[in-house]
Amino acid sequence: METTRCPEFTTVEGRAKAIKMLEGAGIDGLVLLGGDGTFHGGTLLASECDVSIIGVPTTIDNDVCTGTDYTVGFDTAVNTGIEAIDRIRDTAMSHERLFFVEVMGHHTGFIALESGIAGGAEEMIIPEITTSNDVLWSRLQTSFDNGKKSAIVVVAEGDQPGHTFAIAQEAKDKLKIESRVVYSGPCPRGGSPTARDRVMANNLGSAAIQALMDGKKGCMVGEVKREIVYTELADTWGKKKELYPRLWN
């Protein structure tokens, strides 16, 4: 059940229909899989019915603000980004070009940050860190002046998917070097999940069922420092999750 992308669900009347369907089907426990938007809708639903609602953080963006270190799907998305970077680097080096690799992440830069670090990207453009294009061009130019023949810049799509094409054109004009864009699009959202995501999904799924059996309601099950924790659904959305400072440094 999608809890927020259905306009009708944003109204009391719409949620009343959902509650009636749950009651009619004899459902007294509901596990929500999603992120910020899903848990927002789940919080409203939990306050209006007697159904026990448990959330499981499953979003590639890793933007659930509290209650879990990582979300199911994030590791797979990062590894998809790394694979793209690794494959592009061969072409970048052989053709001596500047490549921009755009990855998903909604309004956050978690995927870009971790895939960029792991993939050895020369630069990253992410929404949480303000870096002017002129500074970026200056750093890249210095790198080229020192003998480097190619570079990869990882770009978080932010709220403007495809905006990397404009950035790449500016880079070409400023640096006088051939530039190309690789747009991963929704590819990180599908395919075979990593072992880490599979284990985490099993761990959190089992904990969600145990929560229902223990009579818990209106909370999200998460993993903090490899331990299972429960957080009120109302505390899991509406705030922006900060990047991990140590990784950015």
Image (tube, rainbow, N blue to C red):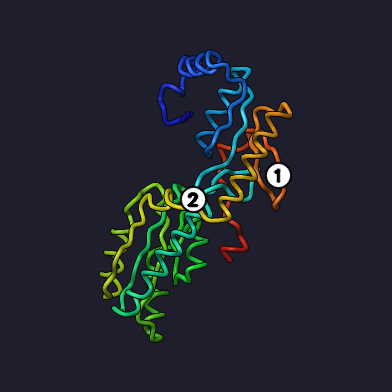
Q: Position of residue 145 (x, y in %)?
A: 37, 84
Residue drawn at (51%, 13%), measured in percent from left and top?
A: 20
Could you say which quadrant of the image residue 140 lies in?
bottom left
Badge 1: residue crowd in 10 Å (few <14, some 14–19, many ≥20): some
Q: Nearer the viewer, residue 73 or 176?
A: 73
Q: Which mark is residue 70?
A: none
Residue drawn at (50%, 48%), measured in percent from left and top?
A: 61
Could you say which quadrant of the image residue 216 lies in?
top right
Amino acid type assigned to the residue bearing label 1 in the image: Ile
Cα distance in 3D space between marks 1 and 2: 24 Å
Q: Nearer the viewer, residue 84 or 99?
A: 84
Q: Nearer the viewer, residue 197 or 176?
A: 197
Decide: is 85 above or below 78.
below
Q: Nearer the viewer, residue 149 or 60?
A: 60
Q: Earlier in the sequence, mark 1 or mark 2?
A: 2
Q: Position of residue 69 (x, y in %)?
A: 63, 50
Q: Position of residue 1 (x, y in %)?
A: 48, 29
Amino acid type assigned to the residue bearing label 2 in the image: Thr
Helix, strand or loop at mark 1: strand
Helix, strand or loop at mark 2: loop
**Residue located beneath label 2 in the image:** 108
**Residue located beneath label 1 in the image:** 228
How many marks overall?
A: 2
Decide: is 247 above or below 163.
below
Decide: is 95 above or below 219.
below
Name the mark nearer the viewer: 1 or 2: 1
Q: Position of residue 249 (x, y in %)?
A: 58, 66
Left or right of 82, for residue 201:
right
Residue drawn at (61%, 60%), measured in percent from left and top?
A: 245
Could you say which quadrant of the image residue 172 lies in?
bottom left
Badge 2: residue crowd in 10 Å (few <14, some 14–19, many ≥20): many
Left or right of 226, for residue 139:
left
